[in-house]
Image (tube, rainbow, N blue to C red):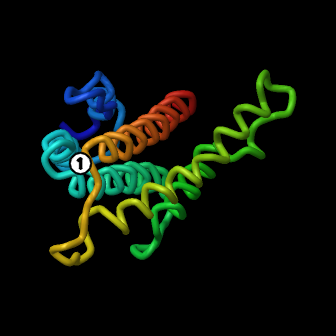
């Protein structure tokens, strides 16, 4: 199903809103099987294994960024962290605050939202480092609740959809 858009999604309560479908439909240029596995893992884990859902949310954004950068022939290092990948992707998509003309309606608001991308990605990475999967933990370590996982998954999904939709829009305007 390569080349077919993927769609990401938002979690609301114990159910999944149409946002997850958005990820599957929007993420072009990615391995559809791998993205589907990540989404399925997040959906299943958000209530039963919040740490896994948080770790997978970070992986989803990384996958989205790496897919966009690869499709645009932009190099990145295997060691690049999530904030660096998002920054490179935002630059490639011309989503940095300096890319928004001052004459654009609500330019200050748009610039502020785009500036917050770095904060969001740093927070997702930190949450994963402290509570997500991927690091050894003591058996006495207390994790987060499903509501925290829903916040991380929803945020990561929204960001991935925004980046992928922007990429698809820009790609469509070039062809």
Label 1 belongs to which residue? 31
- Horizontally, residue 111 falls left or right of residue 126, namely right
- Horizontally, residue 134 falls left or right of residue 125, namely left
Rendered view: 142 above or below 34 = below
Percent from the top left, x then y, of residue 122? 51, 59
Percent from the top left, x then y, of residue 99? 74, 42
- Helix, strand or loop at mark 1: loop
The residue that appears at 54% across and 64% down in the rendered structure is 84
Rendered view: 89 above or below 108 = below
- Count of marks, rendered view: 1
The residue that appears at 26% across and 28% down in the rendered structure is 13
**The N terminus: image quadrant:** top left
Percent from the top left, x then y, of residue 6? 29, 33
Depth check: 9 or 68 in front?
A: 9
Percent from the top left, x then y, of residue 87? 58, 57
- Horizontally, residue 128 falls left or right of residue 107, namely left
Quarter location, residue 44: top left
The residue that appears at 64% across and 42% down in the rendered structure is 114
Quarter location, residue 156: top left
Quarter location, residue 157: top left
The residue furthest right is 103
The residue that appears at 50% across and 54% down in the rendered structure is 121
**Mark 1, residues whose alpha carbon is within 10 Å: few (<14), some, or many (≥20)?**
some
Depth check: 30 or 110 in front?
A: 110
């Amino acid at each position: 199903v390569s080349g077919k858009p993927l769609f990401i999604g938002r979690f609301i309560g114990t159910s999944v809103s149409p946002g997850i479908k958005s990820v599957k439909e929007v993420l072009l240029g990615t391995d559809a099987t791998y993205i589907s596995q990540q989404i399925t893992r997040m959906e299943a884990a958000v209530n039963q294994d919040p740490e896994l859902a948080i770790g997978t949310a970070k992986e989803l954004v990384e996958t989205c960024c790496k897919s966009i950068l690869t499709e645009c022939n932009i190099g990145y290092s295997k060691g690049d962290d999530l904030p660096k990948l998002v920054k490179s992707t935002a630059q490639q998509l011309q989503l940095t605050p300096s890319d928004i003309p001052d004459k654009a309606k609500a330019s200050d608001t748009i610039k502020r939202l785009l500036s917050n991308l770095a904060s969001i990605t740093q927070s997702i990475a930190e949450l994963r480092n402290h509570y997500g999967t991927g690091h050894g933990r003591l058996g006495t370590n207390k994790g987060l609740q499903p509501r925290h996982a829903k916040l991380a998954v929803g945020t990561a999904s929204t960001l991935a959809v925004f980046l992928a939709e922007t990429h698809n829009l820009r790609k469509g305007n070039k062809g």
